[in-house]
């Protein structure tokens, strides 16, 4: 099939023809990528540029035409985002949230992955059950948990009271001390399956001869885990953690639906939307949005630089 | 008899709490959805009398049927558009070496990291300018921002693995590039396409912020916004029974999809993050 | 011949459009509110030969406001007549038509306070449609059981609530609380907090005459300290996330002695499945100490005409019809919507359908408006800061004095030259 047809169709002067073939192929490649690039430019690139531009003005959402250039006043300066204690509160909330969620999800995800990896007849059923929280839309999860954690009629308080673990119903979403914990709890419930699946995939890629060799040598199970399994899955786990962290830093849906604009749980995204939509401050809100974007971009770019070096090394 | 190991014991100890923790909320939501009126506020787990009143209520108080349809249309549209555009791009990025390919890949992936709020005002202006405000097209367009990069990335990973001979043979036979992509490669990529379609569908179905901001009237809303804004017969009431019923209606198909296509989903998720 | 026919057709078409216009109104989102609106609107359409479309809008106030702002901000004519909350005239004023010339003096029959609230920069931007004021609901059976009189001051309320709560708990109902209200960090908290502060003669956050913040005063401090002292004692800590419905849920299940809520809760408490049917009394909220006054926050909704409507005059006529005495009377009888026309409070049929509307007349006429008109399009930020500062005091994060000092400062920063109503 191959060489016959190739040589019969081969032109007289191979080098120039091949390079022109290559060049036409490269042109075609750019043409093929163009639609995707155009779409992304239109819905991501241009709006981002617009946000950056708006952040340098005092625009109001209700009347974008009557805006004036104010330079960096929305950022630094007395009335700027960086001077707003609520912004810093949102930053703190978001960072804490990300730290707690991602660590918990990784540890629990590892445990669940090990469990799913254990040979058993229940494997498929378990995996299906574990996937259920992930399949439920975030808004629905938020509503379900809000109902379960309802201080008067919620089933969680009822159970805890019946077990004697608490003496009065807890105000899970109202009590400033508890609200944050509640948000983390629901997020962990929802996203652990995702981490568990990723870690499970990594576990399954560990070559079985490693384990067999260890068995032959009589290495105890916990040592196998610590010294063989963990190091081998660490790269994959780190990748998953980074993706999850970037997601957690952008959290909006869960917090908005469960505790709306409450200060104790406000994330950066919720803060931006509040400034933008509730207060109609297009300029100021865009500045906050830009700051959030820069934070995420910094982490993303650093990760990519590292990843690219790894990829090019292959 | 097989020796019972310590890990086996741990396993069997861990299974019930994990199962319980994962499934309890949804089971409770189902139980609540069948309780009527004040039965919701009693402490029984299962309803004493099973009633479909909440399910009827969901469709009575808001155009929920329309909302479900909207979600299907938006998610379906997003998937169709994403796949078409991504297949083209993935072919180029996965099989043709050209300068700037690496940077392009990274940029495309980077776009999926944009915080949605960062482009909210810009997107709002674009959508108003196109006259798409309060229409489902606004959502189809804006949801592309996270489905497109992900789809491209996963398809590239799978495209790379396809054999070169097939492609060369077809090109020699005079087939155009589009034929190669859609007639020859697409059937081979079926598992990957299924996986990314499912994940993109679920992501678009779930999307909340854009749906909240770019649609106004009840008839144009998608399901997540409809559920978040469910209200009762007076402007202050929060009908928990209805909310639970709506949640069950929305979730059961999703769970069914996820369970049937478990393996595809897992392969899709892992291809993106663990391989490549 | 052809030209004659065509011009005849054109004239007919033009005449047709001049006669029957289509207006779009957003009024009410769900249930009875929507039904009643549709009814009245259909009546007007029949009488005048025009068409009116009722547009669906989100039920949540915040979402509805965001919607209006988006539509009006883009100059769209998607909605001609809008039902707006009592605190929105200031925010939306620059996009609304002046109804004074089109009302022909009709606004004089309505409560002066609401008309003043709806007048921004000398322009009447909305007609009052129905009103609401915060009320104190109480269990008359429990007060009788413990031989207590309905409280006149907050201090009396706290004592009475404690007595009944402890008594009922000892008797076996361990879910009983003394007083439930709206304590979540949202607009509803601004309503409750304003009531406490005004009842202790602490002013209304921003002084409407001078436009300067007036919140840092001893009355306001005392008010917030009093409210904070209830939490954990006669009020569950969960009140920090209660809205109207959560409070009503507790009261209606029979687990609260007192409740602060809007009038809508009355009808629901008298329904067949309510645990407190026939046991509920309604009165004005208590005074702040012996030198205080009764204070209820003004609620209610108005009807406004969009400046970008292509049929402003016709839309204004629809508004005048809907806010007229006849339609308001119908809504009062059918849906218990409190009229904004004083004369209707002595109407026999209205009083027959709603017995306590007569007692509440003074409450409605003396209701306190939130500082929305004076803060204009910054009201959302003002209210946001106000409710957050209050919430901090209630949750124990801050003491009243420092919270109010900080609030005064941050309000000043919002408008260094003082607040002035939007143009």
Image (cartoon, coloured by chain):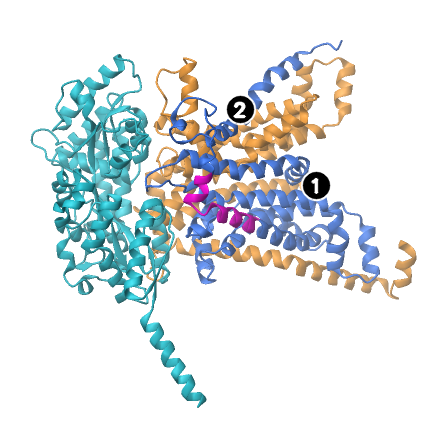
Chain for disc number 2? B
Tell me the colour chain B is drawn in.
Answer: blue
Q: Report the residue marked by disc 2.
A: B21
- Residue C22, how many percent across, how many down? 35, 65
Which residues lie in the magenta part? B56-75
Kindly report the distance in space between the C-alpha atoms of the residues bearing marks 2 and 1. Answer: 43 Å
Q: Which residue is mark 1?
A: A313
Which SS type dominates the magenta stretch? helix
Chain for mark 1? A
**Left or right position of B206 against C247:** right
User: For the image shown, how many numbered marks are present on the structure?
Assistant: 2
Q: Is residue C207 visible?
A: no
Q: Colour of chain C?
A: cyan
Q: Secondary structure at mark 1?
A: helix
From this viewpoint, is residue A253 visible? yes
- Chain A color in figure: orange
Q: Nearer the viewer, mark 2 or mark 1?
A: 2
Residue C77: image x %, image y %? 36, 63
Where does the N terminus of chain C fall, quadrant-wise?
A: bottom left
Q: Position of residue C221 (x, y in %)?
A: 17, 32
Residue at x 78% of width, y 24% of height: A209
């Amino acid at each position: 099939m191959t060489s016959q047809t190739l040589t019969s169709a081969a032109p007289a002067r191979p080098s120039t023809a091949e390079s022109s073939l290559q060049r036409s192929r490269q042109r075609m490649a750019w043409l093929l990528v163009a639609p995707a690039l155009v779409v992304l430019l239109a819905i991501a690139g241009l709006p981002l540029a617009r946000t950056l531009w708006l952040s340098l003005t005092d625009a109001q959402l209700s009347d974008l035409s009557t805006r004036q250039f104010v330079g960096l006043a929305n950022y630094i300066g007395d009335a700027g985002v960086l001077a707003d204690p609520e912004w810093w509160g949102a930053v703190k909330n978001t960072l804490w949230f990300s730290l707690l969620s991602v660590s918990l999800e990784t540890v629990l995800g590892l445990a669940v992955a090990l469990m799913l990896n254990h040979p058993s007849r229940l494997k498929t059923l378990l995996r299906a059950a574990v996937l259920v929280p992930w399949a439920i839309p975030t808004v629905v999860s938020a509503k379900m948990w809000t109902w379960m954690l309802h201080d008067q009629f919620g089933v969680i308080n009822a159970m805890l009271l019946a077990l004697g673990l608490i003496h009065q119903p807890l105000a899970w979403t109202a009590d400033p001390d508890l609200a944050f914990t509640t948000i983390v709890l629901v997020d962990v419930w929802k996203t652990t399956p995702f981490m568990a699946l990723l870690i499970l995939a990594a576990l399954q890629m560990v070559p079985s001869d490693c384990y067999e060799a260890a068995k032959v040598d009589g290495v105890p199970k916990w040592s196998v885990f610590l010294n063989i399994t963990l190091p081998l899955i660490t790269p994959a786990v780190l990748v998953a953690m980074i993706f999850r962290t970037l997601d957690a830093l952008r959290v909006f849906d869960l917090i908005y639906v469960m505790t709306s604009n409450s200060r104790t749980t406000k994330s950066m995204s919720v803060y931006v939307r509040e400034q933008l939509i509730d207060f109609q401050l297009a300029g100021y809100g865009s500045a906050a949005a830009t700051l959030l974007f820069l934070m995420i971009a910094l982490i993303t770019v650093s990760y990519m630089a590292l990843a690219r070096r790894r990829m090019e090394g292959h | 008899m097989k020796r019972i190991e310590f890990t086996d014991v741990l396993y069997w100890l861990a299974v019930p709490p994990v199962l319980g923790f994962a499934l309890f909320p949804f089971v409770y939501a189902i139980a609540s959805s069948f309780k009527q009126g004040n039965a919701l506020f009693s402490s029984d787990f299962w309803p004493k009398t099973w009633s479909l009143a909440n399910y009827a209520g969901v469709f009575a108080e808001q155009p929920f049927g329309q909302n479900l349809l909207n979600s299907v249309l938006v998610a379906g549209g997003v998937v169709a558009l994403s796949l078409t555009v991504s297949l083209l791009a993935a072919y180029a990025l996965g099989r043709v070496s050209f300068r700037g390919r690496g940077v392009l890949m990274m940029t495309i992936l980077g776009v999926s990291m944009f915080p949605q709020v960062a482009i909210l005002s810009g997107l709002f202006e674009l959508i108003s300018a196109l006259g798409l405000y309060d229409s489902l097209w606004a959502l189809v367009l804006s949801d592309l921002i996270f489905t497109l990069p992900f789809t491209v990335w996963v398809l590239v990973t799978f495209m790379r693995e396809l054999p070169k001979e097939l492609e060369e043979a077809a090109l020699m036979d005079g087939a155009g590039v589009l034929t190669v992509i859609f007639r020859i490669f697409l059937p081979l990529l079926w598992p990957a396409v299924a996986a990314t379609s499912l994940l993109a569908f679920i992501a678009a179905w779930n999307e909340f912020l854009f749906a909240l901001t770019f649609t106004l009237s009840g008839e144009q809303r998608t399901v997540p916004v409809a559920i978040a804004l469910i209200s009762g017969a007076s402007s202050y009431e929060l009908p928990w029974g209805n909310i639970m019923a709506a949640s069950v209606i929305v979730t059961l198909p999703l769970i069914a999809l996820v369970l049937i296509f478990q393996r595809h989903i897992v392969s899709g998720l892992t291809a993106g993050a663990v391989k490549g | 011949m052809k030209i004659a026919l065509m011009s005849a057709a054109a004239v007919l078409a033009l005449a047709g459009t001049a006669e029957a216009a289509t207006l779009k109104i957003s009024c009410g989102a769900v249930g009875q509110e929507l039904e009643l609106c549709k009814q009245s609107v259909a009546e007007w359409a029949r009488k005048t030969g025009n068409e009116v479309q009722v547009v669906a809008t989100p039920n949540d106030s915040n979402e509805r406001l965001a919607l209006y702002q988006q539509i009006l901000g883009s100059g769209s004519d998607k909605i001609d007549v809008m039902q707006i909350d009592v605190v929105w005239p200031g925010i939306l004023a620059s996009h609304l038509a002046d109804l004074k010339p089109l009302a022909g003096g009709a606004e004089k029959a309505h409560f002066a306070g609401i008309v003043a609230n709806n007048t921004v920069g000398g322009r009447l931007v909305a007609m009052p449609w129905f009103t609401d004021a915060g009320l104190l609901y109480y269990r008359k059976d429990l007060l009788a059981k413990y031989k207590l009189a309905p409280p006149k001051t907050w201090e009396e309320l706290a004592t009475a609530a404690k007595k009944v709560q402890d008594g009922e708990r000892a008797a076996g109902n361990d879910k009983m609380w003394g007083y439930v209200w709206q304590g979540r960090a949202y607009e509803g908290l601004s309503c409750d907090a304003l009531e406490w502060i005004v009842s202790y003669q602490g002013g209304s956050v921003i002084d409407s005459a001078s436009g300067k913040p007036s919140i840092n005063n001893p009355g306001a401090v005392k008010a917030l300290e009093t409210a904070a002292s209830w939490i954990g004692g006669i009020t569950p800590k969960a009140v920090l996330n209660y809205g109207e419905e959560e409070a009503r849920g507790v009261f209606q299940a029979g687990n609260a002695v007192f409740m602060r809520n809007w009038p809508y809760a009355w009808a629901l408490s008298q329904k067949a499945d309510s645990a407190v049917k026939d046991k509920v009394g309604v009165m004005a909220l208590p005074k702040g100490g012996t030198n205080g006054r009764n204070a209820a926050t003004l609620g209610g909704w108005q009807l406004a005409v969009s400046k970008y409507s292509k049929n402003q005059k016709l839309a204004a006529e629809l508004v005048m019809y809907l806010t007229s005495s006849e339609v308001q009377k119908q809504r009062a009888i059918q849906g218990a919507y409190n009229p904004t026309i004083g004369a209707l409070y002595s109407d026999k049929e209205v009083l027959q359908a709603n017995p306590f509307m007569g007692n509440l007349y003074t409450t409605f006429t003396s209701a306190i408006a939130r500082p929305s008109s004076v803060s204009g399009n910054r009201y959302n930020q003002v209210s946001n800061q106000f409710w957050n500062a209050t919430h901090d005091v209630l949750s124990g994060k801050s003491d009243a004095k420092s919270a109010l000092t900080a609030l005064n400062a941050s309000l000043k920063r919002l408008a260094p030259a003082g607040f002035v109503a939007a143009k």
